[in-house]
Amino acid sequence: MGRDDLDRPPPHVQRNLRALAHGEVPLTHDGLSRLTPWRSVAYLRDLLMQTGVLPPADRQLLLFQRWLAEKLPAVGDTDHRRLLGLFAAWHIQRRLRTLAGRGPLTSDQIRQARDEIRLATSFLNHLAQRGRGLAACTQADVDTWYAGGYTARRLTHAFLRWAMRAKHAPALVVPHRSTSNPAPIAQHQRLALLRQTVNREDVPSRDRVAAVLVLLYAQPLTRIVRLTTNDILHEDGEVLVRLGDPPSPVPEPFAGLMLTYLNERPNTMTATNPAARWLFPGRRAGQPMTSKTLELRLRRLGFPTQRGRTAAIRHLVLQAPAPVIARMLGYHDDTTAQLAAEAGGTWQHYAPGDHTR
């Protein structure tokens, strides 16, 4: 094999580019949706949007719509296919478009949407095995379904509630069981992990900065990956991170770690991300790293994201009034108030607002 063979794009890339160049496929978002394979097309779409050839569109929503267009025809039962199509159009896609109007959709939001379709499909098959359609579903059918694994089937809630609202199913009781966060790590474990973020130079600075945002500021990974370099402020010798209002101060030695990382962010020297402003740039044009990728990296290094975040927020609401913590970290007041009560906080009667007058 010669050098020219190594430099030549794979056959599917040549085929897609040729189809676009010759006008066989229109250079539009709808046109790109006809091409395969989807991963290569998604990469090409990102590049075309990044360079202004295509207008901006939510890539995650487009990927979901493509997945749905392949998923629904594969459903053998005509009535099931019709119900799933209605559920997707009137509940899931409506919700996703609303969320996309507020900001870019995340891979986790799309994963949930896919899981809701998959579980709705499985539930309809469960009814069929019991000799019933959705209109004749009984409470016993629902209870038996959830008895097979409540946590794994919890996302069936959306389909059942939509079906009852739309009169496709009779009135039923959807089981509810608490799926609260796992127990937080102990405070001494959290402090030991924070020390590791400073001392473990064998760990990439990207992962250490992400761990600090989890363990010090109780930030979920879905929010961390949406941070940009503009959210790190360096003013009058002080480093702040904009998570809410006002920005939160970053103490040393974490401030130094964060500033060092800003100058060595990965994935910024490639053709796809020449001017990326994401704090954690991804490999696709104009896109940040996915929360799932970041979670896997931290898990391999021994940083417990969910339990560590729970420990951090519980510690913080014991140090200051819940409304203050909520505003600084971008949480809802009710969430921090509940956590403060669970942690035995003494700020329950604090009145939020301007106390300077």
Image: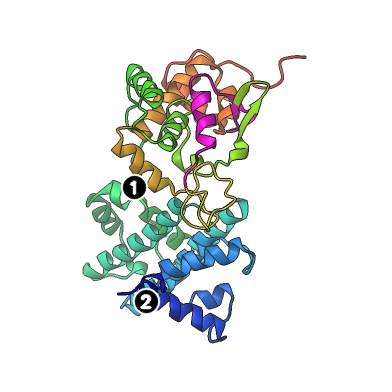
In percent of width and height, residue 86 lies at 47, 70
Residue for point 57% across, 15% down: 349
Q: Residues within 10 Å of mark 1 (few under 14, many from 20)?
A: few
Tell me the amino acid under the disc marked 1: Pro
Residue for point 56% across, 18% down: 321
Mark 1, residue position: 175
Residue for point 27% across, 52% down: 146
**CA separation in Å, label 1 and label 2:** 25 Å
Mark 2, residue position: 79
- Hey, which quadrant is residue 234 in on the image? top right
Assess whether residue 258 is covered by the magenta stretch: yes
Residue for point 41% across, 24% down: 198
Under circle 1, the secondary element is loop
State how many labels appear. 2
Q: For this view, does 197 lie left or right of residue 127?
A: right
Sequence-earlier tag: 1 or 2: 2
Assess whether residue 160 is covered by the magenta stretch: no
Tell me if residue 352 can be seen. yes
Quadrant of the image for the C terminus? top right
In percent of width and height, residue 20 lies at 54, 80
Q: Residues within 10 Å of mark 2 (few under 14, many from 20)?
A: few
Q: For this view, does 142 lie left or right of residue 242?
A: left
In percent of width and height, residue 238 lies at 62, 21
Of 80 and 10, the residue lying toward us: 10
- Hey, which quadrant is residue 119 in on the image? bottom left
